[in-house]
Image (spheres, grey):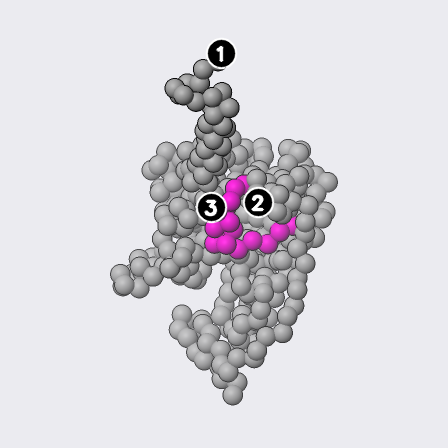
């Protein structure tokens, strides 16, 4: 007679108990996968990730996040001082970063940036097109030169960086491109007469690239900016020096770099590790996607979005009674319609 491990129980009872234990272990493993601090894995070790517009704001946090995940980060911005500040923070943690000061409205400086990456690393695994500019001017205020500059930085540079790095990515056999977007790619705003069209255009560029680059196993997705719950994203026009001078009660309303990294590293890393066999041609909101991954898993995200593209859907909405908008000097005005 075969006895159970528990006196008085039958072999059938013992089998049921073992099944329950096995199921409990599976559930615990699933929950652990959702909550584990993945940053300890250094998931981007050996990868080269370039982030434009990373001297401040959203791009700065992404660069810090990728460095923490073990990537060799190439940070690009116009401000040398802000790049030096970022480099000091990253290197103080023993992480890798290269900085390049460049005006992305100029093709020769984008070419120089490409050459520097090629000479230093010979590859590029992750390209984050994040650089953006807005003069916060209305149609009557904006000059043609300001319009052209906005388009050059916000749209043309995304096209050029992708085109110039494409041969490198093709040789590798895989890569990920992330084009950073915003609410301004969904609807119009006063005093964003160039910024909104540039973001709408960027979404179209993303979809075209997702199609054209799939044969080369290159993922192309767009990512809407965001901040952790209860916080605001620092305005792109706000320099590091200006942010430091804000009163404490104002500064605390904005998410700092560490809060951004803690909240969104998993989402940003997921996108960085995609290729065309995974998720491509999608438009994600940073906060919403981070929450999805927290509640589900990476596998669930791939299952949900793999093999799909994104189509713009235009819907009518109520005309506002007024619109509050930012001005070039950092102030605010209101345009009334009624």
Given residues 117 and 37, the one toward you in this image is 37
Q: Which residues are magenta?
A: 281-298
Q: Which residue is mark 1?
A: 1
Image quadrant of residue 254? bottom left
Of marks 2 and 1, the one in the foreground: 1
Given residues 227 and 26, the one toward you in this image is 26
Return the disc, 1 or 3, that comes first in the chain's sequence.
Answer: 1
In this view, which residue lies farthest toward the top? 1
Q: Position of residue 115 (x, y in %)?
A: 58, 39
Q: Position of residue 191 (x, y in %)?
A: 52, 73
Left/right placement of residue 74 relative to residue 218 reads left
Determine whether 32 is above or below 145 in the image. Answer: above
**Is residue 290 located in the magenta-colored stretch of the structure?**
yes
Q: Which residue is mark 3?
A: 294
Return the disc, 2 or 1, that comes first in the chain's sequence.
Answer: 1
In this view, which residue lies farthest toward the left? 248
**Is residue 27 located in the magenta-colored stretch of the structure?**
no
Under circle 2, the secondary element is: helix
Q: How many numbered circles are shown?
A: 3
């Amino acid at each position: 007679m075969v006895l159970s491990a528990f006196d008085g129980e039958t072999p059938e009872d013992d089998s049921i108990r073992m099944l329950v234990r096995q199921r409990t272990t599976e559930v615990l493993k699933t929950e652990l996968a959702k909550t584990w601090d993945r940053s300890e894995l250094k998931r981007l070790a050996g990868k080269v990730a370039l982030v434009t517009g990373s001297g401040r704001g959203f791009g700065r946090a992404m660069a810090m996040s990728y460095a923490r995940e073990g990537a060799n980060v190439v940070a690009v911005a116009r401000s040398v001082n802000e790049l030096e500040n970022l480099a000091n923070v990253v290197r103080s943690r023993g992480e890798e970063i290269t900085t390049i000061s460049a005006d992305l409205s100029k093709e020769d400086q984008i070419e120089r940036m490409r050459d520097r990456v090629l000479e230093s690393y010979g590859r590029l695994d992750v390209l984050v097109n994040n650089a953006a500019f807005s003069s916060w001017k209305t149609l009557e205020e904006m000059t043609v030169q300001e319009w052209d500059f906005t388009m050059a930085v916000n749209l043309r540079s995304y096209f050029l960086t992708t085109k110039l790095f494409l041969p490198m990515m093709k040789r590798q056999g895989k890569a990920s491109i992330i084009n950073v977007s915003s609410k301004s790619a969904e609807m119009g705003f006063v005093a964003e007469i160039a910024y909104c069209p540039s973001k709408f255009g960027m979404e179209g560029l993303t979809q075209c690239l997702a199609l054209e680059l799939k044969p080369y196993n290159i993922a192309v997705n767009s990512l809407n900016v965001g901040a952790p719950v209860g916080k605001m994203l620092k305005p792109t026009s706000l320099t590091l020096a200006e942010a430091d001078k804000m009163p404490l009660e104002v500064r605390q309303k904005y998410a700092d770099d560490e809060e951004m990294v803690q909240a969104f590293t998993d989402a940003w890393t997921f996108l960085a590790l995609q290729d065309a066999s995974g998720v491509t041609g999608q438009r994600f909101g940073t906060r919403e996607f981070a929450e999805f991954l927290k509640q589900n898993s990476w596998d669930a995200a791939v299952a949900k979005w793999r093999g799909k593209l994104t189509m713009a859907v235009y819907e009518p909405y109520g005309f506002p009674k007024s619109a509050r908008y930012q001005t070039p000097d950092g102030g605010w005005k209101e345009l009334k319609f009624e």
